[in-house]
Image (cartoon, helix red, strand yellow):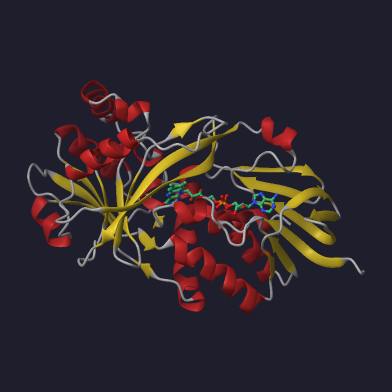
Amino acid sequence: MQQKTYDVAVVGAGIVGLATALQAAKKGLKVAVFERHPRAIGASIRNFGMIWPIGQPPGKLLDRAMRARQTWLELSTEAGYWTSETGSLHLAYHDDEMAVLEEFLSQNVDAGYDCALFSPQQVLERSKYVKAQGLKGALWSASEVNVDPRQAIGAIAEYLKKCYGIDFYFNTVVTAVDFPHLMAYTQLFKIVEHIYICSGVDFETLYPSMMAKSGLTKCKLQMMASQPQDLPLGPMLCAGLTLRHYTAFAQCPSLAALSERFDREAPWYKEYGIHVLLSQNINGQLIIGDSHEYGLHQLPFDKAQINTWILQYLKGFAQIPELEIAETWHGIYPKSTTGATEFVESPAPNVTVINGLGGAGMTLSFGLAEEVLAQY
Ligand SMILES: Cc1cc2nc3c(=O)[nH]c(=O)nc-3n(C[C@H](O)[C@H](O)[C@H](O)COP(=O)(O)OP(=O)(O)OC[C@H]3O[C@@H](n4cnc5c(N)ncnc54)[C@H](O)[C@@H]3O)c2cc1C
């Protein structure tokens, strides 16, 4: 049998693999994507669907997020997936939270964020879900976009197949890469230009010794979805705990006092990496999470107590008339232990691993893939 030949092979049909395949196809290259499952079922379909530039620090990462946001919006019409330009609200119920928000705004006047400080009244006009009692104000950001990852990831793959002629090999695990060859299940392929490995949390199959030295670990996150709600969420919501999660706020002097208060009042937030975000999917379900547990060997068992803490914190800032949990799950993503925002390395000529985007893969992948593919 004749060996199949492609210019570019991409391992993994999660968001990183899809973004990489799109960029390669835009260069006119003939691309194949290999995915071990019948469809992508990793981190890329288990997330909030938050395209979240506000979490990125100013400069290179904010710029990357804003370019990626543009791609999400442009593709949505062509690929036929749902997006909502909801923006987001960081809600403040404590003086230290307001102080962080004010500091963030004054530090970033010309940084490229589209933000404003809202009074409680402005917040309540914008969102029917925000709890009014004790509300001191909020940071409004216009940039955040809500997608439904379960819908979008499949739709993008279909679109790449139809409009760019990319071949998708589902149910096909890649077991070995030795450029210019790639072994996919039992079939050997010849790759002319480049092989990109976007295998997410699988560090064990391809170049395991390099992955062992990559400085990446794994992070497990617990998530929930409510029964569908009649009311649209509007802006995606979060509150004080989130201010210590994203590096965008890391330079705010009041963050230390805020963090110290949380550690005093509820140390389990830090212990389990809990901060609480709220988005909505295309069916009206509220998507609620999350926690962060780190380690290379993650157990499959979810902790009911973590979900209880998440819901308790949620009720401090969101009023949801009928909050019935319909689904719980967890996702795992690779995360740098050194603070790196991505892992892009070549274990061999013409082979590149793109991984380690942590909790911002939906926000950054389209932008990162553009930068990586521009080098070849
Ligand atoms: C619970 C949760 C919430 C999150 N929320 C957000 C959010 O709202 N916004 C945001 O920006 N980011 C969010 N993230 C982060 C984001 O989802 C990830 O950064 C991103 O999905 C990682 O994409 P990926 O393509 O690297 O990995 P994956 O989606 O895991 O894809 C990797 C794919 O490679 C395949 N694969 C692996 N090895 C092989 C092989 N040898 N052969 C064939 N196929 C292979 C796997 O089957 C898998 O489908 C969240 C993550 C989680 C877990």
Going by the picture, which residue comes out furthest to the top?
264
Front residue (pair 118, 203): 203
Q: Residue at x 92, y 69 (%)?
A: 2
In the image, residue 24 lies at what x, y percent?
A: 69, 64
Image spot of residue 346 (x, y percent): 74, 44
- Pick the quarter of the image with the N terminus: bottom right
Judge whether 45 appears above or below 310 on screen.
below
Q: Judge left or right: residue 102 versus residue 73.
A: left
Report the side of 352 relative to 15 (left or right). Answer: right
For this view, does 13 lie left or right of residue 276? right
- Percent from the top left, x then y, of residue 93? 15, 39
Is 270 drawn above or below residue 146 in the view shown? above
Specify the quadrant of the image occupied by residue 302: top left
- Quadrant in which residue 374 is drawn: bottom right
Kindly identify the residue that appears in the image at 66 percent across and 39 percent down. 203
Count of marks placed on residues: 0
Q: Please tell me whether residue 165 is drawn above or below residue 277 in the rendered image.
A: below
